[in-house]
Amino acid sequence: MRIIKRNEAKGQLKVRVDSMDDLWYLHQALQPGTIVGAHTFRKLEAKEDQVRADSQPRVRVYLRITVFSTEFHPFTDVLRVRGTVLEGPPEISGHHTFNVDVGTVLDLEFSEDSTEVISLLEDAQRNARGTMALAVSMDDETADLFRLRDYGMERIGTVRTQGRGKWTGKEGSWDSYYREISDLVSLNLGEDMLLIISGPGFFKESLAKLLRNEGVIDGPRMHVLQSSSAGPGGIREALGKGGSVSKTLEGLRFIQENELLEEFMERIGKGRGATYGLEEVRKALSMGAVEVLLISERLFREGPGKVLMGDALGTGSRTMVTSTSHELGDMLDKMGGAGALLRFEV
């Protein structure tokens, strides 16, 4: 995301959506009452003497709406912003929906208390990098391919061994299995992207050998990592001990988020160094005891999370709005949506 213009005193921003990851940030930021302006296409309202209103052409106009709802599903390429028309040509009134995608420029006007929302959008600008890597997680039955996005892992394909029989140990036994995975990787791998292959057993090494021999990817951009299982959990496990590749990818928000949530859950399990729940976290913040504040995206959108985040920013605590698109983020949400890593016990 690029912040083109800002007036923090009035809570105003002009932003451009540069990646699909930006849509997740905007979904958190655009709350009911936010004013959004953008160019869009809209049919002008028919005059009384016109019989067929549906024959009216769609024209490009600039509208400002007062938001009443947003719709976004993780890893989709459109954010729908619905609202009541506040400003535009006199022929247009009622409701309108902006379909926000990559390249859209928006004029945003928040309420007076917009510090936390602007801070979140500044995160989007700092983290702007697009897809940095693909990850294959595989075993002897299934291979899943994921894009590593800023706020999570997007599953983009699955290859199964069904119908191929069991592994025989002979060279070429599962050529078609590896070939399908190779074709899926070739289709989705960008020129500068890394490729992580993880999983148990020797299957990942066999795939890596094929990809090198076929020239799909050069050696330095491919990292083969061990994990005890396949699937998203296996990728998180592998990246947690991935050495140099983890360092390369540590700027991805979901990796930072995953590390913080793992540390939080570990401390909760030990019964020290962390707390959760709205009231408990609020108490810890009032005492200056919070080192890192974790807020689920649901709690942030509903309002109480913004209040906690404002208190945390005032005490110098680090903050993280967590996605519920993965297991640990969903667990935090079910624990009340608020958690904290503590500087000292409360």
Image (cartoon, helix red, strand yellow):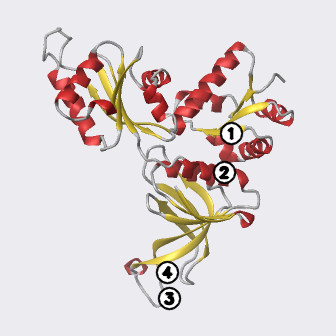
Q: Can I make out residue 325 in this image?
A: no
- Label 2: element kind: helix
Count residues near mark 4 (Cα–Cα under 10 Å), then give few for <14, some for 14-19, many for 20+: some
Vertical arrangement, residue 176 with respect to residue 153, above or below: above
Residue that appears at 54% across and 27% down? 327
Vertical arrangement, residue 244 with respect to residue 11, above or below: above
**Marked residue nearer the N-terminal end (3 or 2):** 3
Count residues near mark 3 (Cα–Cα under 10 Å), then give few for <14, some for 14-19, many for 20+: few
Count residues near mark 2 (Cα–Cα under 10 Å), then give few for <14, some for 14-19, many for 20+: some
Task: Say which residue label 2 marks.
Answer: 119
- Label 2 to label 4, Cα distance in Å? 39 Å
**Marked residue nearer the N-terminal end (1 or 4):** 4
- Label 3 to label 2, Cα distance in Å? 48 Å
**Marked residue nearer the N-terminal end (3 or 1):** 3
Residue that appears at 55% across and 52% down? 125
Could you tell me if the residues under marks 4 and 3 are in contact, i.e. CB atoms within 8 Å? no
- Label 4: element kind: loop
Task: Say which residue label 4 marks.
Answer: 45
Q: Can I make out residue 166 in this image?
A: yes
Q: Amino acid at mark 4?
A: Glu
Task: Say which residue label 3 marks.
Answer: 48
Q: Amino acid at mark 2?
A: Ser
**Image location of residue 340, percent across then percent down:** 72, 30
Could you tell me if the residues under marks 2 and 1 are in contact, i.e. CB atoms within 8 Å? yes
Please tell me whether mark 4 or mark 3 is closer to you in this view: 4
Residue 263, located in which quarter of the rendered image? top right
- Label 3 to label 1, Cα distance in Å? 55 Å
Nearest the eye: 238 or 25: 238
Task: Say which residue label 1 marks.
Answer: 319
Residue that appears at 42% across and 14% down? 228
Nearest the eye: 327 or 58: 327
**Residue most toward the right?**
287
